[in-house]
Amino acid sequence: MSKQHKPAAPLLFATFLLAPLVAAAAAAPPAGRIEITADYRYATHETENLVEAKHLVCREAWRLAVVNSSLYREQTASIVDSPLLRDLAYTLATGYVQDRQIVEQTEQGRTLSCRVQGYLPIEESTRVIRTQLSGGPPSAEGLDQNRALRILSVREESSSTIAVQYQALKRLDWLGTHYQGGLRESADIMVDFYDGQGLLIRTDRFPARRTPSGEDVLNPGAVAILKVAKPVGTKTHRVWLVK
C-alpha cells in the first residue's frame, strides 16, 4: 500500500537537464564553417537593364560578404594587390559559399539592394586563399573562360584605357542568321569598374565580335584584343565572362 513510483522524479529531472543542452546545440554554428552576411546597394543608370542590375547587386553582395568575413581579413591582411584580392573574393563567393540565401531584395526608384547570408567552409576556404595568393603568374589556360571564349590577358594601356586579349574557343559568326551553338550571350566580355572605396561604378558588356583584321567571324583559336575606356573615378577593374 505504501509503494510509490519513485523513478518518476529522476526521469523528470533528467528531462530538465537535457532541455538547455538541446537548445544550445540548435543555436551553435555548423562545425567547420563561419557565417557570412552582407547588404549591398547600387544606384542604377537609366540605360542599364534592371534584370541584369539586380543580378549584379546580389553578386556584389556575395563578394562583400566574403571580404567582410574574419577568415578572409585574417588570411589577406598583408596583401595590398587590389585586383588579386578582388579576384580571390569572387572565387570564394561564386564557388565555395554554402547554404546560400538571398534574404531580401529591394527596389526604390533606381536604387537596388540585396541582402545575402551563407557559410564559408573554414579549412577549404583557407586552402583556396593560400593557394591563390602564392600561385604566381596566370596559367596557360588564361584568366577566365567559358564555352565560347578565353581571356588571355588584361593590361593597362593608358591611365584611361585597358586592353583585353581574348581567344575564341568556338566559331563565332555574328553575320549569320543562326548563331553557332546558341552561345551569343556567353560570347560577351564583361568589365566591372570600381572606385577607390571598392564600390561598383558600373558593369559594361562588350561583344567578342572582331579580330584585329576587322573580320566579323572568329574561328576557334583566333585571338583578338578589346580596348575599353575606363569611366571617371575608376581605381580598379575586373574582366570576366558569363558562365
Image (cartoon, rainbow, N blue to C red):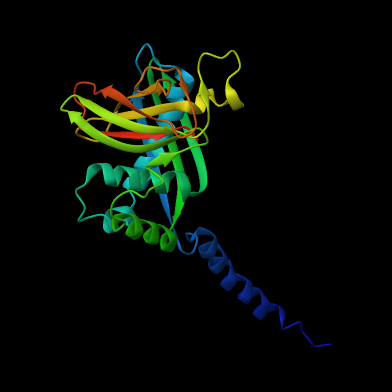
Residue found 37% across the figure and 47% down from its top: 66
How many circles with numbers are drawn on the protein?
0
Task: Give the residue at x 22% y 55%.
Answer: 77
Residue at the extreme bottom of the image, as rendered: 2
Front position in the image: 21 or 242 = 242
* Observer-nearest of 51 and 186: 186
- The residue at the point 56 percent across, 14 percent down is 176
Residue closer to the observer: 39 or 155 = 155
Q: Position of residue 116 (x, y in %)?
A: 45, 39
Q: Is residue 49 above or below residue 133?
A: above
Q: Residue furthest left?
A: 159
Q: Position of residue 228 (x, y in %)?
A: 28, 23
Instruction: Using the image, determine if residue 136 lies above or below residue 203.
Output: below
Quadrant housing the N terminus: bottom right
In the image, residue 74 lies at what x, y percent? 27, 58
Q: Is residue 68 left or right of residue 231?
A: right
Quarter of the rendering containing residue 224: top left
Decide if residue 194 is in sight here: yes
Q: Is residue 173 left or right of residue 122?
A: right
Give whichever of 175, 187 is nearer the camera: 175
Q: Residue furthest front?
A: 213
Quadrant in which residue 178 is drawn: top right
Q: Can residue 106 be seen? A: no
Q: Is residue 167 above or below residue 67?
A: above
